[in-house]
Image (spheres, rainbow, N blue to C red):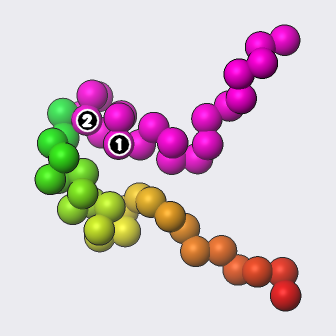
Amino acid sequence: IDPVAAPLLGQHTREVLRKNLGYDDARITALADAGVFGMVATVGAG
C-alpha cells in the first residue's frame, strides 16, 4: 500500500498550467482572478 495521499482537487493546477501549457504567472493569476479555477463555493447542509 502506498501511504501517499491522492492530490487534492486543484492542487497542481498552477504547476500544470506553467509546465505543460507554458503560461506565465501573470496569465495564471488573471485566469484565477476571473474564476476559471480556484476555490469553489459550496452550499452548506444547514
Viewport quadrant of the N terminus? top right
Query: Is 8 above or below relative to 38?
Result: above
From the top left corner, tell me how far across and down residue 5 is, in percent: 71, 29
Residue 35 occupies quadrant: bottom left
Q: What number is the disc on residue 44?
A: none
Q: What number is the disc on residue 18?
A: 2
From the top left corner, tell me how far across and down residue 32 is, in percent: 32, 61
Q: Residues within 10 Å of mark 2 (few under 14, many from 20)?
A: some
Residue 4 occupies quadrant: top right
Magenta highlight on residue 18: yes
Where is mark 1, residue-wise?
14
Q: Which residues, given as a range, are shown in magenta?
A: 1-21
Kind of element beneath mark 2: helix
Query: Is 32 above or below relative to 11?
Result: below
Amino acid at dot 1 = Arg
Q: Name the side, left or right, on which 18 lies relative to 35.
A: left
Q: Residue, x 29% and y 28% (percent of image)? A: 20
Q: Name the side, left or right, on which 5 lies relative to 16.
A: right
Q: How many marks?
A: 2
Distance of mark 1 from mark 2, alpha carbons?
6 Å
Magenta highlight on residue 13: yes
Kind of element beneath mark 1: helix
